[in-house]
Image: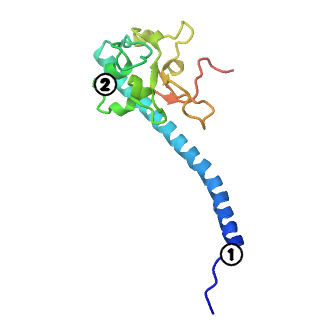
Amino acid sequence: MSPRGFTIVELLVVIAIVAVLAALVVPAVGFGISRANSAKCLGNLRGIGIALNGYLADNNMTMPPLVAGRKSLNEDVPVIDNTLATYTDNSRIFACPADPDQAKKSGTSYYWNSVLSGQPVANLNFLSLVSDLSKIPILLDKEGWHRYSENKVNHLFADGHAARELRLFTEP
């Protein structure tokens, strides 16, 4: 008796099952990777917050006089990566893992809230509207890279916490 091979119908059934499984697994993996990148980005913002605290301790508790960001590494302006680099031993914290190219071009994935530049921390306010440190954004992602999150941009606040939500005012 000769060995029997697979029929075309059996092969097509197996291929269909594999295709259905792949269709279920690929989005789940993408979701998991995106959430992990968002969490790493929040960790980076917290690390930048620690570096900022080192800067504040050395500079009379006054926020650094920075511009919001730069378009390319060739611009010689004070921004977070070149000002706070000496306060951290991890230069990778200036690049969000979800950022495809901004950090490579400009040195960082984050924008500085330049309204705060030069303000003393004790009297910090945002546009004369918000003085609660937990509601004043200091840094934020340059773009909405976190596609599986309702709020696609992460923020670092003046009290040191990092979050996906931006709430400037207290909700009733």
Q: Position of residue 128 (x, y in %)?
A: 54, 6
Q: Nearer the viewer, mark 2 or mark 1?
A: 1
Q: Nearer the viewer, residue 117 or 28?
A: 28
Assign the N terminus to one quadrant of the image. Answer: bottom right
Q: Is residue 127 above or below residue 42?
A: above
Q: Position of residue 171 (x, y in %)?
A: 66, 21
Q: Earlier in the sequence, mark 2 or mark 1?
A: 1
Distance, label 2 to label 1, CA atoms, is: 64 Å
Few, some or many residues within 10 Å of mark 1 (<14, 14–19, 20+): few
Q: Nearer the viewer, residue 90 or 97?
A: 97
Position of 52 with respect to 137 (left or right) is: left
In the rendered view, how is the structure colored? rainbow
| Quadrant in the rendering for residue 106 | top left
The local secondary structure at tag 1 comes to loop
Q: Is residue 9 above or below residue 30?
A: below
Q: Residue 19's mark? A: none
Q: Which residue is the site of mark 1?
A: 7
